[in-house]
Amino acid sequence: MWGYFFLVASAAIFLYFLFAVKSGDTLSFDRYLSSFFTGIFTEGSYPFFELMDRLGNKLGVGIVTLFFLVWLWVKHRNYTAMAALVFAVAIGNEVNKWLKDAIGRPRPDQEHLVNVASLSFPSGHAMIGMILYTFIAFIIIEELKSAKVKWVTGILAGVWIFLMGISRIIMKVHYPSDIAAGFAAGFMWVFLSIVLYEALRAMFTKKAFEKRLS
């Protein structure tokens, strides 16, 4: 039930920022939050956020995805989850590229602390980070028995995703509205991917059960 609430909320957030960006109404929001985050996290924190930034680039996402796929295969032979994860990340990445090209928002006009080549809205790091780490957290939480440990795992995943997103603000390559929209778009896509995964798993489990009975 809560998942569907967050799905609708994410859609509303994404559409709000989409229309705001197209009409140029995000300037005060972006200026305030950019100043807030860059004021809190000074140059001493840059190495940490540069690491978070790297974990969200293509190489970082590829390595993390590969490690988790190996874990799913070695420990569970969970081919459905493996396929769903690859589907979620790969298609999510293509959707992000399409959105960037369709919306065409330039990067912030300031000195970037990391190299960037694509457009700005929505943030790929925020969107793909939300997809990848939410899916991983979902699979891990399913394995856990303790409700407290499940909550802690979910909170840690949320903090990790948040830090990955704001790393792009601190590295001066994204507006905060890019990050918020990336989180929203990422949640919508990973939610739908998890729904698809659970439907496929239920179908395959039913078929395997019927096969054993026959």
Image: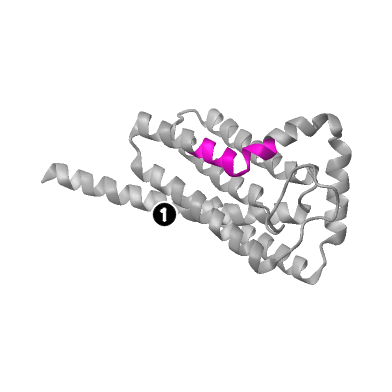
Q: Position of residue 20 (x, y in %)?
A: 77, 67
Q: Quadrant of residue 9?
A: bottom right
Q: Position of residue 209 (x, y in %)?
A: 21, 44
Q: Quadrant of residue 76?
A: top left
**Coloring scheme of the render?**
one colour
* Mark 1 neighbour class, 10 Å CA radius: few under 14, some 14 to 19, many 20 or more: some
**14 is higher (above) or lower (below) than 53:** below
Near-viewer residue (152 or 176): 176
Q: What residue span does the magenta drawing correspond to?
A: 52-65
134 left or right of 195 in image: right
Q: Amino acid under label 1?
A: Leu
Q: Secondary structure at mark 1?
A: helix
Magenta stretch: helix, strand or loop mostly: helix
Would residue 54 be counted in the magenta stretch? yes
Q: Position of residue 192 (x, y in %)?
A: 49, 56
Instruction: Identify which residue is drawn at 89% across, 40% down.
Output: 39
**63 is higher (above) or lower (below) than 24:** above
The residue labelled by disc 1 is 196
**9 is higher (above) or lower (below) than 81:** below
